[in-house]
Image (cartoon, rainbow, N blue to C red):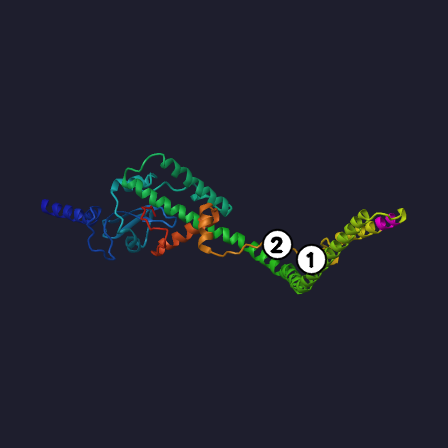
Amino acid sequence: MFEQAGAVAAKIVDRWSWWQNALRGNFGPIHSEPQQGYYRVRGKDGQWEPVAIWLDDGGAWLAYRSGREVRDVEHLWTFACRFPIEHAIYEKAMAGGGFDDEPPAPIGDNSGDIDPFEALRIEYLGEKEQAEEFMKQPVKTQAQADKVAIWSKRLTAIKTKAEGLHKVEKQPHLDAGRAVDDKWRELKSDPDDLAKQLKAHIKPFLQEQIRAEEERQRKAREEAAKLREAAEEKARRAAAETGNTEAEDAATASEAATLARRAEQLEQEAEARKVNAGRTGARVSMRTVKVGVVTDYSKAAAALVAMKHKTLIETIDTLAQRAATAGLPFDGMEIREEEKVV
C-alpha cells in the first residue's frame, strides 16, 4: 500500500517536472502534448494573461486563461509553452496584480465605442501618466527594464495607430483639395504663363526702344552742349567788343539768351524717358533687377558656412547623417559610434 502511494506521489511530481525545469531555463522537448504548469500568453491588446494547464483525475487536460476555460488546450499550449511563470506570479496576476515586468494596462483599454481620436488620446494620456511616474526613479531591475521595452512598443503602437487614423480622416479632405486644385489649376497657372510669354515676346522691341532712347538722349546732350557753348561764346564776344550801339548790344544779349534757353530745353529733353507699352494700369516695361550668379561653389559654400547660414548648416548635417548611415564619409565629416536605445 505504501509502495502504491509512493508511486502515485512520484507520478504527480513527475507531471510538474517539465514546467519546473522550464522555470530554470531548461526547456525539454516541446510537442503538441501539453505539460502541466503555469504559463502566460499575450492577449490581442499585447498584455500578458495568466494560463494554468493540468491533468484532471480522469486524465483529461484542462486549461484556463485569465480565469476562462479554454477548450483547445493543445492550441493554447503552443503559445504558452515558452513562457512558464511561478505559481505565486500566476496567483498575483489572477488577483489583478498584473506582472512585475509589464506596465499596468492603459486607462483607455475599456473606452468602448467612443470617438477613435478620444479613445486613443485617453489611452496615450494613461500611458503618459504612468510612464512619467515610472521615470521619476532610476531603472534598477530587469523587470523594470522589461517594462520600458513593453512601454516603448505600446507607445509606438499608439503612434502607428494615430498615423493610420489621421490618414483615414484626412484623406477625404486631401482628395477634395486635390479636386479643387485640379479644377482651378489651368486658370491659375496658364494665364500667368501666357503673360510671361507675351512679356518675353515684347522684350526685343523694348530693348530696341531703350537703345533708341539712349541714342536720342546722347544727341540731345551733344546739341545742348553746342548751343550752350555758342551762347557763352556770343556773350563773351559781346562783352569784348567796343563801339557798338546800345541796340546792337541788346540784340547780341538777346541772341545769347535765346541760345541759352534752347540749350536748357535740350538738356531737359536729354533726361531719360521711360520705355514702356500699354496704358495706365496696364503697362509693361523694362526694369533692371539684381540676379545672383554663383561663380565658385566651393567659395560660396565656405562663405555661407562662415556666416552660419541656418539652411545650409541643416542641409550639410542631413547629408552627413545619410553618409554615416551608408558608411561613406566625405571630407569634413567623420562617423562616430554612439549608443542608442532602440
**Residue receiving disc 1:** 285
Tell me the CA gap for discs 2 and 1.
Answer: 12 Å
Q: Is 253 colored magenta in this rendering?
A: yes
- Residue 74 sits in which quadrant? bottom left
Q: Is 133 colored magenta in this rendering?
A: no
Write the residue at 33% across / 34% down.
137
x, y percentage for residue 104? 37, 40
Provide the residue span drawn in magenta: 248-254
**Amino acid type for the residue under numbered disc 2:** Val
Horizontal side, residue 244 vs residue 161: left or right = right
Residue at the outermost top position: 136
Q: Are dots 2 and 1 in contact, CB under 8 Å?
A: no
Label 1 environment density (alpha carbons within 10 Å; few <14, some 14–19, many ≥20): some
**Residue receiving disc 2:** 289
Q: Is residue 28 visible?
A: yes
Give the main secondary structure of the magenta stretch. Answer: helix
